[in-house]
Image (cartoon, helix red, strand yellow):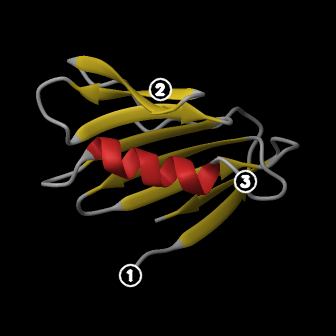
Amino acid sequence: MGGISGRRTSQSLTSFEEMEIPKNPKLVTIDSNLSAWIDAEYDIFGYMELKNWKVKVALNGESATKKLTEIYNILKDSSPPDFSTGQILLSSRDTFIRWQSADRKYEYDFN
């Protein structure tokens, strides 16, 4: 089970602590217009930025490159209406999505 919530905010989108490039990064091409960073030793950690989205994956036994490509294919042609910035954290156990409204007055969380 998960939840969705929203709140009025007067500040920029708060960051997940986990939103960062892997410690041992290797640049990989997701599409001709986009690259992502994957852990050079283990293809289970990855990070990319696309259309005001920051996306972090930390998987167990799945390819981060493959998962980032799947997320890219979803996000490249769509964003929620009334959207300014967002973050996605996808792990083997949880998924968190956070975004801010275009007027930056509201912030929403989904997990």
Residue placed under numbered mark 3 in the picture: 79
Locate residue 16: give its quadrant.
Answer: top left
Give the residue type that dot 3 points to: Ser
Res 18 visible: no
Q: Would residue 39 be found to the left or right of residue 36 on screen?
A: left
Give the residue type that dot 1 points to: Met
Residue placed under numbered mark 1 in the picture: 1
Of circles 1 and 2, the one toward us is: 2
Q: Would residue 81 be found to the left or right of residue 11 on screen?
A: right
Please tell me whether mark 1 sits on a helix, a strand or a loop: loop
The 10 Å Cα crowd at callout 2, few under 14, some 14 to 19, many 20 or more, is some
Going 61% across and 67% down the picture, which residue do you hit?
5
Q: Quadrant of the N terminus?
A: bottom left
In primary-sequence order, the first of circles 3 and 1 is 1
Give the residue type that dot 2 points to: Ser
Please tell me whether mark 2 sits on a helix, a strand or a loop: strand
